[in-house]
Image (spheres, rainbow, N blue to C red):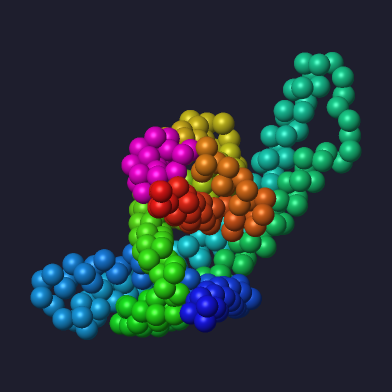
Amino acid sequence: MNLLKREHLKILFFITLFLVMVGALFSLPRLAIPIGVAYIIYLVFRPLISILRKFRLNRNTSVSIVFGLFLFLSIFPVIKVVPTITQEAERLTSFLPRVESYLKKGYKEVKSHIETKLGFKLDEQEDSPIEILKISTNTSKVVLMSIPKYLGSLLEWTLVIPFFLFFMLKDDGQFRRFILGITPNSIFERFYNLYHQFNKNLGDYIFAKFIEATIIGVIITSGLLIIDLNFAFLFGLIAAITNIIPYVGPILGAIPAIVVAYAEFEFSSSFWAVGILYLVANTIDLAIVFPLLISKIVNLHPVVVVVSVILGSQLFGLIGMIISIPAAVAIKLLLQELISELYETRDY
């Protein structure tokens, strides 16, 4: 009886500690974000250490090589790309009044055409679409003017994230051994299995999303440079970042470029070329890249993916959409383990 009571206390302590750790991270976003990013990068780069160890390199040398590779892949793009993105963001801020002017002109032309065809005058309420344009323009200005500040935060993270990542790689196994050491015996095997599977799926998923976003960003940036649209690098970055959001992201990423293309080219062939570029890029993504990379890794039914994204959006907004698929994978693993425990391990 005492042993059973002690096991129950262990389970209670384990669950309480887990909830406290999760609650602490959620209540300290400035700390949680770099730790979370470092952990995701750790999951992506950790397999490289195992590969290097097969070449009979010791652990410290393997960690140094992997960490150096991470620094190169992260710092080099920041040094080369951030100044260009910042300049384009500042230029786009001054370009917005021209965009607003062209959109107003286009709206009035469409309105006039509709009134001529239908034979009656549309309701004049200070043209609500024009008001929406003003609000959108002002919001865009705020966002664009904030980009240098966000980039400043990214530069700060380039110092903090490598710090956490280095010790995660260096002390790999110690934290895992601590968690497994306090895991109650009655749930040890199941917890270890879930921990291992989730880490593997999450690391593979993040790596696949990174590859997917990179492919889209390169396609969009290259295409816009060929079309000679202003702010090609900025729009390529936006397309890559918004691609992280399932389904809705590609549409959101296309809107800024299409609006600027209309202001620059109106309805010329170059404008339609921009639209076709985004259509082709997202078709390649949905028809080839997503099925080969993402669907194979998460192994979720398309209906489950869509429902997960909708629920994530409703509960947690944009962040919920981004984390919806990893959360669905975690729930799936838990359900599989529960069903296995309830239906496949009975004693008859």
Judge whether 39 appears above or below 334 on screen.
below
Residue at 41% over, 48% down: 348
Residue 288 highlighted magenta (yes or no): yes
Nearer to me, 240 or 248: 248
Counting from the top left corner in percent of width and height, residue 145 is at: 62, 66
Residue at 55% over, 61% down: 89
Give the number of callouts. 0
Judge whether 24 appears above or below 54 on screen.
below
Any part of residue 212 in sight: no
Counting from the top left corner in percent of width and height, residue 122 is at: 86, 27
Judge whether 109 appears above or below 10 on screen.
above
Residue at 37% over, 59% down: 197
Which SS does the magenta portion mostly show?
helix
Range shown magenta: 282-302
Counting from the top left corner in percent of width and height, residue 328 is at: 51, 51
Counting from the top left corner in percent of width and height, residue 148 is at: 55, 70
Residue 61 highlighted magenta (yes or no): no
Q: Quadrant for residue 299, please give it.
A: top left
Left or right: residue 152 compared with residue 217:
right
Residue, far left: 56
Nearer to me, 62 or 180: 180
Any part of residue 60 in sight: yes
Left or right: residue 308 compared with residue 226:
right
